[in-house]
Amino acid sequence: MRKLFSGKRVLERETNEGSSYFVVPEEKFQKYVVLWGYLIPHGVFNQPNKWVNTYTISPSDTYVLVTEFNPKEYEYMIYEETRVARQLHQILEPYGIDINNEFEKFVELEEIPEAAISKVKDCLMEKRCMNDYPEDFPVVDGYEYIIEGEKKKLIIETETYHDDDTL
């Protein structure tokens, strides 16, 4: 039995019907970075509707091969911190912009007024909404496969990273 599973990972997944097992060759696993929050490409900080919202993309697509992710493509990587929307609302209100204290409405804005950009940046930094790469992005082992014509990813959860999404 030991020879049969030599060089392979045996993984168990709980299902309603019981456990299912995956046997995957160790060398087939790759490192994936888990993207989360909002990724802001260079030159579009003033246009929140052009930010990449990782909460609205397919859960499978938030896992990107470490070798294919280029953090230099993004000027900032942020996440929504509690109460930041209220402060952003106060910053934008004098410019006639009402986001109703909702971050979701903020990221729908087509443009932040030029005079408010530095205040918005300062607010996000003050509230510690800025993510740092690679420190704030988990890296996990994963295996990509195709079943019934559909690409799937098998992601290995760890004690420090757990995701309930079925990929």
Image: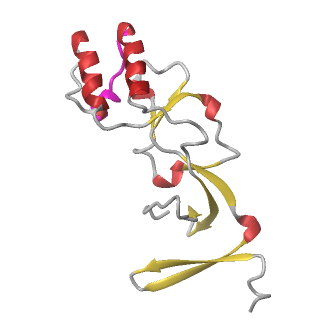
Q: Say whether residue 81 is magenta.
A: no
Q: Residue at x 37, y 15 (%)?
A: 119
- Horizontal side of residue 19 vs 90, given as left or right: right
Front residue (pair 109, 130): 130
- Dominant SS of magenta comes to loop
Q: Residue at x 52, y 50 (%)?
A: 61
- Horizontal side of residue 25 vs 106, given as left or right: right
Give the total number of marks visible in the rendering.
Answer: 0
- Please identify the quadrant where the N terminus is shown: bottom right
**Where is residue 30 shown, x and y percent of the image?**
69, 58
Q: Quadrant of residue 141?
A: bottom right
Q: Magenta stretch: give its range.
A: 104-113
Q: Farthest residue toward the bottom? A: 1
Q: Residue at x 40, y 25 (%)?
A: 126
Q: Quadrant of residue 145?
A: bottom right
**Where is residue 42 shown, x and y percent of the image?**
55, 22
